Amino acid sequence: MRRSMIGDIDVGVINVLLVSAHDWFASALQAVLEPEGFVFARARSARRALRTVETIEPELVIIGERLPDLDAAGLAHALVAGGLKESVPILVYSPNFWHEQEQAAAMAAGAWDIIKEPVRPSLVVAKLRRLLEIKRLIELTEENSLTDGSTGLLNLTGLMRSMRLLEATAQRTAAPLSCVVIGPSDPASGPDLDRQKRTAADLCHRLLRESDLIGWVAEADFGVVAYNTTAAGVTSIVRRLNQSLAQSPDGGHMHPLSAGVVEFPVPDAGTSRSESNTDRVPRIASLSRLAAAQAALRDARHGGGGIRIAESS
């Protein structure tokens, strides 16, 4: 496989989505960038670009001017709204006749930078390398984060870490603790999946308690771990979310929700700390209970939807 260096990082080939109706611009960019390890997928219209972006997962997007169906700002906005990863740089080509307002509109719509005329090869290559370094730093930060950047909910690592702490607290206080994994009965993919996730996150932020742990378990499925709440209580949470979803204009993206529920075993209030060993909850215990709730959700989906209660040891 061909290799290329971005800074000190060996990144291999770099997939670029080039959206341009003009052959001369496309040819000029390819002549400059292909020797540097950039591989191009060409789209001649905004509509085609929005379809292509789902299949090639570009690391860069470059948009030319005078597309037949959208201007550069409109396409940049549509890509961002359609679920293009926030870490993917979008660049817009600015011909000499563009005014400052047009460049500003493209930046406001989601473009990271402008390629100005005349196209200077060394400057373009240096600019793209720098943007790819920034992209990698963003992705490394997201990988090490405990939250999902696009929705604000915990990611699986954050959910697991917080879950163990909450489980230890519940055991020390002999309080009930329950977990529910919730997801659309018919999960989508691509941009529709991103819309489902944003809708789910909005419901959680609006309807759930601040004391509830909420995080992503799988692409379409989120878990809610509720302190001092029984299985019946988290079942009510699912019903409340579905009721709100049915009344929401965004409900068509993911209605109805199915769920798998597991209630954690809690020691008797009279059990001593040394007997119950609550100082530390093993990771495997929390993970197995989360997996049990997810398996119950899977059973609910196979059965046509609804809520399933799982046993937890």
Image: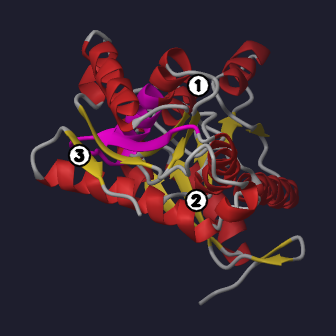
The amino acid type, in three-letter code, at marker 3 is Arg
Q: Secondary structure at mark 2?
A: strand
Q: Classify mark 1: residues with Cα within 10 Å, few (<14), some (14-19) or many (20+).
A: many
Q: Secondary structure at mark 3?
A: strand
> Based on the displayed image, in which of its 4 quarters is residue 97 positioned?
top right
In front here: 211 or 64? 211
In the image, residue 195 lies in the stretch drawn in magenta: yes
Residue at image location 72% in from the left, 66% down from the top = 32
State which tag comes first along the sequence, 2 or 1: 2
- Could you tell me residue 178's position as x and y percent? 46, 42
State which tag comes first along the sequence, 3 or 1: 1
> For the magenta stretch, what is the residue range?
175-200
- Could you tell me residue 89's position as x and y percent? 69, 46
* Distance (Cα) linking label 3 and label 2: 45 Å
* Discs 3/2, front: 3
- Could you tell me residue 226's position as x and y percent? 53, 35
* Discs 3/1, front: 3
Instruction: Give the residue number, with chain letter if any, for mark 3.
Output: 308
Horizontal side, residue 50 vs residue 77: left or right? left
Instruction: Give the residue number, with chain letter if any, for mark 2.
Output: 16
Instruction: Give the residue number, with chain letter if any, for mark 1.
Output: 73
CB under 8 Å between discs 2 and 1:
no
Residue 132: tell me if it is visible: no
Residue at image location 64% in from the left, 27% down from the top = 211
Q: Secondary structure at mark 1?
A: helix
Q: Classify mark 2: residues with Cα within 10 Å, few (<14), some (14-19) or many (20+).
A: many
Q: Is residue 27 above or below residue 3?
A: above
The amino acid type, in three-letter code, at marker 2 is Val
The amino acid type, in three-letter code, at marker 1 is Ala
